[in-house]
Amino acid sequence: MEKAKISAYQLFVLILLFELGSAVLVPIAIDAKRDAWLAILLGMVGGILLFFVYYRLYRFYPKLVLTEYMEKLVGKILGKILSFCYILFFVYLAARVLRDFGEMLITYAYVNTPLFIVNTLLILIIIYAVQKGIEVLARTGELFFMLLYLLAIIGFILMVFSGLFELKQLKPFLENGWGPIFKVVATQTLYVPFGEALVFSMILPYLQNTKKIKIAGVAGILLSGINLALVMAINISVLGIDLATRSQFPLLTTVQSIQIAEFLERLDVFFMVSMVIGIFFKVSIYFYAAVSATTILFKIKEPSKLVYPMGLVILFMSITIANSYSEHIKEGLEVTTRFLHPFFLVVIPVVLLGIAYLKNWGQKRKSQSGTKNTSMSQKEQL
């Protein structure tokens, strides 16, 4: 671990930017149709519960990151195997988010530019940021957090004045009942983006004021969930459910619809800047977690030497991960969120927490029995 400290507010900002990330870009929870916003809010509640699992594990080992206390809970051999799997998992997710960024830019802005060039430009900036450490990344997050919300407020005001909202598009409420909503929550929104807060298990030991971790974490997930639900409700109310379902990037389509007094239009730059900020932080945090875990697992003294080769791995994986954007999305829905996310974000943390409780209970029993034996021997001597 590097010698760094971040504040609770910086943790809140990083979690918020991370959760928004690429989730604003893609049509999240759209399988729930008009109730997609509700599926997002329910997924947010589940994400907060998962965060309590991650937080409780941290409380058992406040000076260790995820890959360190796994060895203490399940043994060195199995712990190292799981640590290596989590490294691959973080790298894989970083590559997926980077691919989302590249696909968005070449689809709407740089049509004739190769995906490799677009992704390379962003990964070079991310490599530089990760090499500087978590403190620099956290301070950068504070600056861009203000810019992101300024753009969001301006964009919302422009949508209101352009008269795009049609709230009747959100009706009928619960048209198909609760079944489709709970299915989307169980297979999508519980994990993406809320359950992905697991990655902050690699960052929590850096906090200065550990008493505010729970508040910062819950606030970050709560605000990001409300924002995502609001964005999806806006997309559906502006585009209608049919167009919102068919659109690759519904928020971009919504922003492109803004037109005021026949001269203020084509505000794609609002969307582009927001996407670059969100995806930059999401990839950076996954990247940082992978570098940190690799450093600890293989006991590397100079983590900076890992940044460039691992950045290249993420870059090339983002290019080769799928042959097309549709294949990329299909892989994410049918493989990543169905198999990888439940295993890495729910099953393993819950099992680890159960083992931690059992070990803690066993240690208390031993200490209590030892105290009783000592007191009895003292009585016998008397």
Image (tube, rainbow, N blue to C red):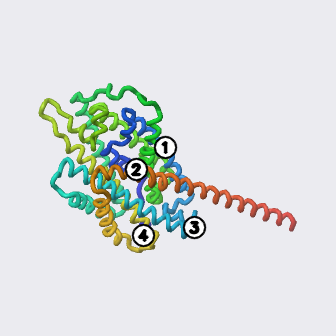
Q: Of marks 4 and 1, which one's residue comes earlier in the chain?
A: 1
Query: Is residue 300 visible to the viewer in this orientation of the structure?
Result: yes
Q: Of marks 3 and 4, which one's residue comes earlier in the chain?
A: 3
Q: Residue furthest left?
A: 263
Q: Which residue is mark 4?
A: 295
Name the residue: 45% across, 59% down.
202
Q: Position of residue 34 (x, y in %)?
A: 37, 32
Q: Of marks 3 and 2, which one's residue comes earlier in the chain?
A: 3
Query: Which quadrant of the view contains residue 235?
Result: top left
Q: Is residue 224 above or below residue 345?
A: above
Q: Is residue 203 above or below residue 252?
A: below
Q: Position of residue 56 (x, y in %)?
A: 55, 53
Q: Is residue 216 above or below residue 123?
A: above
Q: Which residue is mark 2?
A: 334
Disc number placed over residue 75 in the picture, else none: 3
Helix or strand or loop: what does disc 2 sit on? helix
